[in-house]
Amino acid sequence: MTAKEHNETALRDLETELRTELAVAEQADAAEQAEQADRVDQARPEPGWDAVADDERPPDPDGERYESRLRSLLGAVSALER
């Protein structure tokens, strides 16, 4: 195997791994959002009540940053493959 073939194989493997990890991260985020929506629906006060549910939390910034970094890495791999 030449160095070029080795590099191409490594990039394809890296891209596959990044896409898999991104899919897992997206599924985890979707599951967390669904779980949070269920908690909010269950804790929702009667109409006219302006309180915010105790379980309502802002999105996880670490999760969003992780997905953003994975997308950036995928972009870099795509650029190298050209």
Image (cartoon, rainbow, N blue to C red):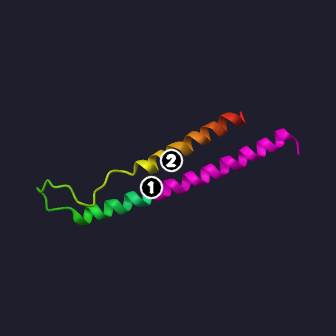
| Residue 8 quadrant | top right
Q: How many numbered marks, from 0 up?
A: 2
In the picture, the disc for residue 9 is none
- Magenta residue check for 4: yes
Q: Position of residue 32 (x, y in %)?
A: 40, 59
Residue at image location 31% in from the left, 55% down from the top: 57
Q: Considering the image in quadrants, where does the C terminus appear? A: top right
Q: Given the image, on which type of amino acid does mark 2 rest? A: Glu
Find out whether the residues at labels 2 and 1 contact each other: C-beta distance under 8 Å.
yes
Question: Left or right: where does residue 65 sit relative to residue 7?
Answer: left
Query: What amino acid is at disc 1?
Result: Asp
Label 1 sits on a secondary structure element that is: helix
- The residue positioned 32% from the left and 64% from the top of the image is 38
Q: Real-space Cα distance between discs 2 and 1?
A: 10 Å
Q: Quick check: 24 left or right of 42?
A: right
Residue 22: percent from left, percent from top: 55, 51
Q: Residue at x 71, y 50 (%)?
A: 13
Which residue is the extreme one toward the left?
48
In the image, is residue 3 above or below residue 48? above
Residue 65 vs 76, above or below: the answer is below
Front residue of this view, candidates 60 and 5: 60
Quadrant where the N terminus lies?
top right
Q: Is residue 52 left or right of residue 6?
A: left
Name the dominant secondary structure of the magenta segment: helix
Query: Where residue 76 sits: x, y (%)?
Result: 63, 37
Judging by the rendered image, the residue that carries numbered circle 1 is 29
Q: Which dot marks residue 67? A: 2
Q: Which residues are magenta?
A: 1-28
Crowding at label 1, few (<14), some or many (≥20) Cα neighbours within 10 Å? some
Look at 20% across and 55% down and name the residue there: 52
